[in-house]
């Protein structure tokens, strides 16, 4: 197992390298640069001075090598749009915000979604199943920006219960989390329902029922574990997505999060931030995929056994 | 299932209706609230506790006078630093400098500084202003607005690395006397450039990180920077050591950084923000119906325009350009896009600009009006131009592209409005190109477009806007006209106001007659404020910051 | 109770062993039959056809042109004259919604289908071969998933100047298949260890055949759920693409574009966003119900 992990970590470095290189060339080939994005008509001299100061006037190959050297020395660079701020500090300050909101939303969404999915599958074609499916439908088709705008208006203006924007207290988190958990509730309910239906049609469940095992025990012992597997893959990729956050929710509720920062950085052509954040997001993503595979191997007896063979 | 679906969807619609219910049934009376449109709000007894919470449009880039990139940053500087002069009620008045003398030839300015202190107790000296200028001239800082200071001796040379920053024409002859030497005459220097101070020891202490956090910044203005939570808010406190502290009533100011417009409106509606510029027509109607709010119209001093690429094969012909300019229904555009807040523009310079005591627009008729009279049929003009350019005489064979620098749904709606106006009036085909603003700016700057939508803000004097087309490449329109350049540079050196105004008028006439641009409208901001806010003024170019505002009867 | 002399042996009728209990039926034939029996799924199918028909007919017969601006009638609530109201520029929304449906249904369906097919095959091959093939393929998926999508899209919008439907589909599907590939792979990892797959391998059936004929049908339920899920996602991502200039160009429109255009007016004119979203939801509902029906029909384990 540890050899497996080491091998995967090795691959992770390769993938990181590939991703960062691709992103580097992509971001340097689209038109625009950090200063043109911010300041309107820039005299040629100022633009040249700016590019020279940061070395953007050199051929792209030279810039790439310099970037790699910097990276290997452990320096992720400083922002260009917000001069003087280091990428590492940006991550340190903003990641907890995205992480908190996204993490809590995921946990709530996941828990409720799984429960709803199981209930729906077990009560197939009855009233409760249909209601849950409608909820799942709404969760996927109502765009986040609608949810956010409506919630913000209803709960901060019509009934001024929560603060409109900002970050700092628990009440600042309620509305953003509410917006972000509807999607996971919908998708996990749907997947779980489908998975449970698959499992309940298996022979061993039939056997257990024929043996007279109590319905609740069947669910807890057999159904739950076996239908859980597809969800593991989904959870892992969702976890990776927490830090890249939701641009829309962060903009509407003025949360100082990484999602908004990343998209803004691309639009502002803030190269260092784009690349620095990309590295971090990719790293998190790959790690979570690795954990996902390990979990699958541990939890699914079939894979575990066949691996041992 | 279907019933449940319908029920749930109705619930959502009801939520939406809830919101709409809040809107009172006001008749569409645009004059309601207009009686508040005076230049000063009514005075009242100030409250005991003076706080203010307002919107700050964007996260500041960096609070370093030599490295900042955003216009919002400059607005903040006027509250936390003391420039040499400010613009108050449209005229330049002393701030950090209590008086100044200008030499006969206009090339030497001697400023006599007031007594003022930094927030750590040290006095503000002339050397601090010199340090700031040197830092701005340093090419390592790549100061984005360096060109505003080029008239100072050796500034441009230092910025290009051809001279040392110590050679620039700024010296402190003693602690309270600052001498600026100009390399070329510039009578509008004080209304176009801002001179903020910066302490040399602080700059050295923090180096690259100067101005990235509240504790890496020193204030000497009407307010001090108490705290800065990135992407969230900025808190200011009254500076008791400020020379004019007795006249500042606000104690605490919170600037909330909210990028989303719906969130801004919600924040204002529930009272978190004390005032806000509102452009959405439905919200305007809603707020006009509220008794606890008033409204003030503040002209923005900004011209929205279409620039034509004069190097493009189609638009190198002036008649074609003019035809497109004349085919626009400016009244409809101003009405639909800004809900009547903006004024249709038939010239470049907005009505807030003045030359000394003379208001520009009152003295100069907008050039496009006369041209419109002379050319009632834009389509005929287009055909003439096409024939001249060898493009045939059938507009339906002509396809042109309008580039737009925003990709929001609203932007698409506006662009479609232009598109349909041109297609209907001229019979040609107009394609739309949407890019995010960085790509758009880059393309326009490099001349990769045919027609593009842009805007230009003005300074007190027409000098700034006019000079945008007097650059080496002819500005965004790539319109190189030597007579124009001469007029603009001569105006900068003309002391007599009437003469200067005349030169500006001639330059503007050239620009519009040759249709280097098609001005569309002059924007204005409709500011709604709760009735307890006092001291707002509608002077576009004033740089007094928040010094005059106070609350009464919160 | 029974006694021995209650029954007499009749014997065996040899010819009876040759007759079939029912007619022979192929996998697909059986699936079609089961699908047709599912009333709800059939209803959903017809509803979808009806919507497609509307998108074709309405713009042709409507008295309003979907692109004609009528400034005096801006922002009107639904009425007898305008069944869905008018938009910011006075255009009739009923006509625009059905015009937009053409693009959205086409893109939503084709897009998520293409992505599902690519994802399935890719994931299936990776799961089947395992070992270093799996390792390499999954690493490629990781690389493609990690490159920021916005950058890729901006880049594409510059490189591919045209904005035709195939270009649009290309931009949307270029990385969209990655999550499905991963999901399918993990499902198939389990199946590839089962006996019948081993048997097929031993028999010498080609890998592609094994993947298509054995592994895919057994993961079909998860795949179908995924496809139905992706459809609204694709419709909205088309709107997102139009933000960077790749989507349908104005005045042509799509449901996603209409919903986004109605975004700012949600609180005052909710109908602008409601109707396009309603139809996106309806489309997804149809596909969900059809998908359930298909899953029941195609899943060999449910075969009766």
Image: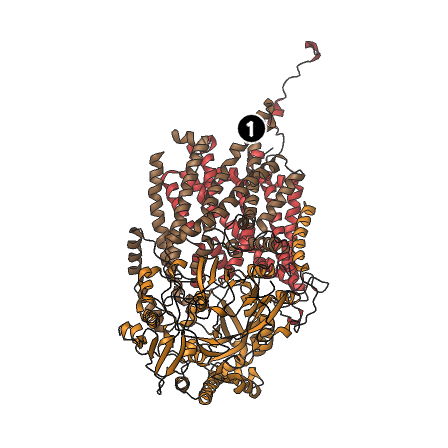
Chain colours: A brown, B orange, C red
Furthest-right residue in this view: C80
Decide which of C89, B149 is in the foreground and name it.
Answer: B149
Residue B170 % position (x, y): 32, 76
Please tell me which residue is depicted at 42% across the width and 39% down the height of the picture: A291
User: Looking at the figure, which quarter contains the N terminus of chain B?
Assistant: top right
Work out whether residue C136 can be spotted.
yes
Residue A161 % position (x, y): 60, 51
Asked if B337 appears above or below A106 in the picture, the reply is: below
Please tell me which residue is depicted at 64% across the width and 74% down the height of the picture: B35
- Secondary structure type for disc 1: helix
Asked if C60 appears above or below B163 in the picture, the reply is: above
Q: Which residue is mark 1?
A: A203
Please tell me which residue is depicted at 67% across the width and 51% down the height of the picture: B11
Q: Using the rendered view, name the quadrant where residue B228 is placed.
A: bottom left
Residue B52 % position (x, y): 53, 62
User: Looking at the figure, which quarter contains the C terminus of chain B?
Assistant: bottom right
Asked if A98 appears above or below B323 in the picture, the reply is: above
């Amino acid at each position: 197992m540890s050899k497996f992990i080491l091998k995967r970590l090795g691959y992770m470095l390769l993938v990181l390298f590939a991703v960062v290189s691709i992103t580097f060339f992509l971001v340097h080939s689209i038109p625009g640069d950090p200063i043109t994005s911010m300041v309107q008509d820039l005299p040629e001299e100022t633009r040249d001075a700016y590019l020279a100061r940061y070395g953007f006037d050199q051929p792209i190959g030279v810039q790439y090598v310099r970037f790699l050297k910097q990276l290997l020395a452990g320096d992720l660079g400083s922002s260009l749009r917000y001069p003087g701020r280091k990428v590492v500090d940006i991550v340190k300050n903003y990641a907890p915000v995205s992480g908190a909101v996204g993490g809590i939303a995921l946990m709530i969404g996941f828990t409720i979604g799984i429960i709803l999915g199981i209930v729906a599958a077990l009560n197939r074609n009855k009233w409760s199943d249909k209601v849950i499916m409608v909820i799942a439908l709404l969760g996927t088709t109502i765009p986040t920006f609608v949810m956010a705008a409506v919630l913000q208006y209803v709960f901060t203006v019509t009934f001024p219960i929560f603060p409109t924007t900002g970050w700092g207290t628990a009440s600042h988190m309620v509305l953003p989390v509410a917006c972000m958990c509807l999607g996971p509730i919908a998708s996990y309910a749907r997947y779980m329902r489908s998975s449970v239906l698959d499992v309940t049609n298996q022979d061993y469940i039939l056997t257990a029922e024929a043996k007279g095992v109590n319905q609740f025990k069947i669910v807890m012992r057999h159904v739950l574990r076996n239908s859980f597997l597809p969800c593991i893959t989904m959870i892992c990729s969702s976890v990776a997505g927490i830090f890249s956050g939701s641009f829309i929710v962060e903009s509407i509720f003025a949360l100082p999060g990484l999602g908004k920062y990343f998209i803004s950085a691309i639009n502002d052509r803030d190269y260092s931030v784009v690349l620095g954040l990309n590295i971090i997001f990719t790293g998190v993503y790959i790690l979570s995929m690795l954990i996902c595979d390990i979990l699958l191997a541990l939890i699914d007896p079939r894979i575990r056994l066949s691996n041992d063979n | 299932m279907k019933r449940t679906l319908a029920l749930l969807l109705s619930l959502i619609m009801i939520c939406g209706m809830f919101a709409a219910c809040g809107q009172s049934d006001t008749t569409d009376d645009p004059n309601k609230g207009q009686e508040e449109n005076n230049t000063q709000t009514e005075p009242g007894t100030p409250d005991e506790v003076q706080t203010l919470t307002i919107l700050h449009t964007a996260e500041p880039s960096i609070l370093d006078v030599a490295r900042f990139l955003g216009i919002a940053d400059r607005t903040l500087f006027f509250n936390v630093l003391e420039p040499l002069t400010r613009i108050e009620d449209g005229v330049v008045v002393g701030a950090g400098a209590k008086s100044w003398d200008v030499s006969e030839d206009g090339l030497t300015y001697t400023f006599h500084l007031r007594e003022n202190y930094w927030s750590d107790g040290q006095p503000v000296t002339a050397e601090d202003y010199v340090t700031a200028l040197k830092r701005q001239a340093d090419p390592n800082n790549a100061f984005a607005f360096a060109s505003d200071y080029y008239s100072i001796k050796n500034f441009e040379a230092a910025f290009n690395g051809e001279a040392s920053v110590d050679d620039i024409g700024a010296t402190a002859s003693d602690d309270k006397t600052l001498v600026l030497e100009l390399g070329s005459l510039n009578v509008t220097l004080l209304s176009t450039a801002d001179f903020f101070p910066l302490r040399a020891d602080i700059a050295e202490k923090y180096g690259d990180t100067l101005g990235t956090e509240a504790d890496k910044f020193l204030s000497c203005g009407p307010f001090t920077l108490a705290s800065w939570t990135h992407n969230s808010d900025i808190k200011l406190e009254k500076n008791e050591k400020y020379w004019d502290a007795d006249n500042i009533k606000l104690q605490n100011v919170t600037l909330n950084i909210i990028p989303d417009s719906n969130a801004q409106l919600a924040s204002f509606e529930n009272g978190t923000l004390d005032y806000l510029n509102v452009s959405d027509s439905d919200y305007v109607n809603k707020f006009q119906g509220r008794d606890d709010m008033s409204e003030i119209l503040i002209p923005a001093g900004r011209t929205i325009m279409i620039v034509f690429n004069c190097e493009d094969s189609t638009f190198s012909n002036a008649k074609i350009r003019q035809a497109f300019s004349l085919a626009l229904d400016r009244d409809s555009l101003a009405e639909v896009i800004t809900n009547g807040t903006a004024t249709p523009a038939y010239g470049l310079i907005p009505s807030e600009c003045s030359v000394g005591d003379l208001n520009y627009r009152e003295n100069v008729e907008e050039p496009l009006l006369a041209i419109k009279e002379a050319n009632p049929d834009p389509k005929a003009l287009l055909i003439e131009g096409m024939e001249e350019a060898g493009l045939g005489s059938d507009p339906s064979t002509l396809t042109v592209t309008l580039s737009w620098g925003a990709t929001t749904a609203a932007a698409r709606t506006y662009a479609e409005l232009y598109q349909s106006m041109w297609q209907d009036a001229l019979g040609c085909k107009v394609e739309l190109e949407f890019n995010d603003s960085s790509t758009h700016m880059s393309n326009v700057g490099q001349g990769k477009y045919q027609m593009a939508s842009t805007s230009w803000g003005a300074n007190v004097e027409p000098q700034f806007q006019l000079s945008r087309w007097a650059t080496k490449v002819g500005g965004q329109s790539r319109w190189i006209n030597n007579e124009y350049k001469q007029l603009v540079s001569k105006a900068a050196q003309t002391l007599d106001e009437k003469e200067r105004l005349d030169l500006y008028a001639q330059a503007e006439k050239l620009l519009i007659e040759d249709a280097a641009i098609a001005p569309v409208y002059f924007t204005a901001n409709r500011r709604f404020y709760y009735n307890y806010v006092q001291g707002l003024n509608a002077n576009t170019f004033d740089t007094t910051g928040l010094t005059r505002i106070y609350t009464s009867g919160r | 109770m029974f006694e021995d002399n209650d029954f007499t042996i009749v014997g065996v009728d040899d010819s009876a062993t040759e007759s079939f209990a029912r007619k022979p039926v192929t996998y697909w034939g059986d699936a079609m039959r089961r699908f047709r029996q599912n009333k709800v799924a059939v209803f959903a199918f017809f509803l979808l056809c009806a919507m497609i028909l509307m998108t074709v007919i309405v713009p042709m017969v409507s008295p309003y042109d979907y692109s004609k601006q009528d400034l005096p009638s801006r922002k009107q609530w639904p009425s007898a004259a305008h069944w869905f109201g008018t938009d910011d520029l006075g255009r009739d929304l009923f006509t625009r919604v059905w015009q937009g449906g053409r693009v959205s249904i086409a893109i939503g369906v084709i897009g998520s289908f293409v992505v599902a097919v690519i994802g399935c095959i890719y994931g299936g091959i990776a799961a089947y071969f395992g070992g270093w093939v799996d390792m390499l393929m999954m690493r490629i998926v990781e690389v493609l998933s990690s490159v920021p999508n916005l950058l890729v899209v901006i880049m594409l919008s510059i490189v591919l100047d045209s904005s035709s439907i195939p270009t649009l589909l290309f931009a949307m599907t270029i990385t969209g298949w990655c999550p499905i590939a991963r999901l399918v792979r993990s499902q198939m990892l389990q199946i590839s260890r089962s006996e019948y797959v081993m048997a097929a391998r031993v028999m010498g059936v080609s890998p592609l055949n094994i993947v298509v004929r054995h592994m895919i049908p057994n993961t079909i339920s998860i795949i179908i759920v995924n496809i139905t899920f992706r459809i609204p996602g694709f419709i909205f991502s088309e709107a997102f693409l139009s933000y960077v200039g790749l989507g349908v160009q104005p005045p042509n429109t799509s449901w996603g574009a209409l919903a986004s255009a109605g975004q700012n007016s949600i609180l005052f004119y909710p109908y602008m966003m409601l109707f396009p979203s309603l139809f996106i939801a309806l489309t997804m509902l149809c596909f969900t119900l059809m998908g359930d029906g298909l899953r029941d029909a195609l899943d060999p384990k449910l075969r009766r």
